[in-house]
Amino acid sequence: MSFKTKGNAVSTAGILISLGIIYGDIGTSPLYVMKAIIGDAPISAALVYGGISCVFWTLTLQTTVKYVLLTLQADNNGEGGIFSLYTLIRRKAAWLIVPAMIGGAALLADGIITPPISVSSAIEGLRMLYPDLPTVPIVLAILTGLFLMQRFGTEIVGKAFGPIMLIWFTMLGSLGSISVIHHPEILQALNPYYAYQLLVNYPGGFWLLGAVFLCTTGAEALYSDLGHCGRPNIRFSWTYVKLSLLLNYLGQGAWLMTQEGNVLHENPFYGIMPAWFLLLGITVATIAAIIASQALVTGSFTLIGEAIRLNLWPKVKLIYPTNQKGQLYVPSINWLLWLGCIGVVLYFRESSQMEAAYGLAITMAMLSTTILMSYYLYTKCKSRVLVSIFLAVYLAIELAFLVANLSKFPHGGWVSLLIGGVLLTIMYIWINAFDIKRSLTEYVRLKQYIPALKELSADESVPKYATHLVFMTSAPHPKEIESKIIYSIFQRRPKRADIYWFVHVETTDEPFTTEYKVRKIADDAVIRVDFRLGFRIEQRINLFFRKVVEELVGNGEVDITSRYYSLNKQHLIGDFRFVVLEKFLSYENDLPLKKRFIMEWYFNIKEYTSSESKWFGLDTSSVKVEKVPLVIMPAQLPKLKRLST
């Protein structure tokens, strides 16, 4: 059965992929949410009923209404995530880049916290059977195996994890239903009255929102993984997922009421399991918790791919493991996440300690999505009243969660904010450096250099550099060219060629555009090729350019036979050579502190990222990389005085 991740049809395979990829975080929340809500307080009806009521309405308002029903509508040709949402509205207001950057950095930071807490909480459940079990080495091994799997693509991961998660959710619903039968009064907890009583009248009840929030932390990843699974499959599968989760929460509440007046000594998730089922239940829970980390990992790949297109992140290597649309693997991010996860495990060691760092960053991401989504809704419906209601309701909800989560800051919450701050700093540096470079790029009219190019091509006193010389150009207008390219051709070292090609690549907001246009600026001398590629299309310019040349030759529009007399007689193809100009920060700069910081860090980071030639997918054997000094503000030299001899 083919896997459909895009379109209007719901497929069995697509639903399984959705279960395997995006619901791990939300799906394993019953492992720790009720335990976190109860904490060390005596078990009471107000605490249990109020906690379940808060969980139900959080899942309903945050996950179902905001994300599944509303935010999934804001797809960019099938792609989701906070940067896709920003792409849809970025031309309306420039300031929207701020919440987009904050949300993206927060979501990536959460991707470093989610895998450790999910895996650790599950593995620690084995201590019920093996009290002296050392969990940290097991957690580290499992996380390493999970990140090794990413290179095979989310389609493979979804196939492997989907059936397991189907078993998991079925187990959740079944165990919860059996427990509810013994205490059906727990169904009253769905009444919002109990949530109100907990937050307003229960001592310290408001601060329990930090624990309640853990039930919806995977909602943002659900939107980010839209391109991997497709909106219809997500919506259809969420119905079953939510029902299973609610039944399990209600079942845990029913069991807790049998312990009323006592202090919690065991995880209520395992408390509702029959003794004979405990070993199997812990095993399935462990596997499901391992899968839980998948949602943020795949969502992080999507975010980085879109951040690169928006010039918010360095150009790192992107791999498309399968032919399936939406499948993406980013090696550098994969291993950075792995290092971050290993560091979190070694620092906190226990899942109870990790809870203090969990949830704070993701509230920032959700607030950012609310702001961007409000603007998106306004552009679509034009009703200020409806948009204001949406904005007011979700700002109130998420600000309440944020305030409650701030209490975690001194107990470990600072870790997620620190990680998010570092990521946000990189985005800030990259977008500002891009703007600085763009402001300094000088374009000249290509037409005025055509005669000189023809003369150079015919000047046999200059050694021939290549039969076909190809320059990558950033000039968006076909009649213009960067002055540095003209300098490279005529002055740096005269580059004589039979045909000069100028190749421009435009990345479109649509994910899968593959178009090109050819302009003959001077017959048999100067040709420009403009590629329009979607932001999910791998930049294989070497192969794309070859296809274009083959088509031009087939149509008789260009002759690529070697112009060397001895080779021309044998009808051999001339050689092609690409020239890529890479900038470096010149010493001849006298920069203000802010610009100096931005540009120095920009070039420091760039040392560890893909080169321009690798990013464009050029064959390194036929590429010449020339370094061009970037002079922003020339240094003021002191006046020199000549001494007589």
Image (cartoon, rainbow, N blue to C red):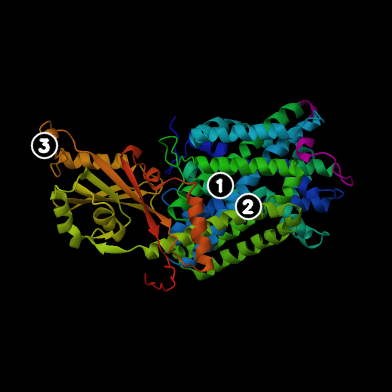
Q: Position of residue 230 (x, y in %)?
A: 47, 44
Secondary element under disc 1, as helix, strand or loop, is helix
- In three-dimensional space, the C-alpha distance between marks 2 and 3, rounded to whole angstroms, equals 62 Å
* Amino acid residing under circle 3: Tyr
Q: Nearer the viewer, residue 162 or 527?
A: 527
Label 3, residues with CA under 10 Å away: few <14, some 14-19, many ≥20: few
Q: Main secondary structure of the magenta part?
A: loop
The residue at 54%/45% (across/down) is: 299
Image disc number at residue 222: 1
Query: Which of the two discs, 1 and 3, labels the residue nearer the N terminus?
Result: 1
Closer to viewer: mark 1 or mark 3: 3
The residue at which mark 2 appears reads as 419
Q: Quadrant of residue 142?
A: top right
| The one of 358 and 400 positioned closer to us in this rendering | 358
Give how far across and how far down residue 46 sits, in percent: 82, 53
Mark 2 vs mark 3, foreground winner is 3
Residue 449 shown in magenta: no
**Earlier-in-chain disc, 1 versus 2:** 1
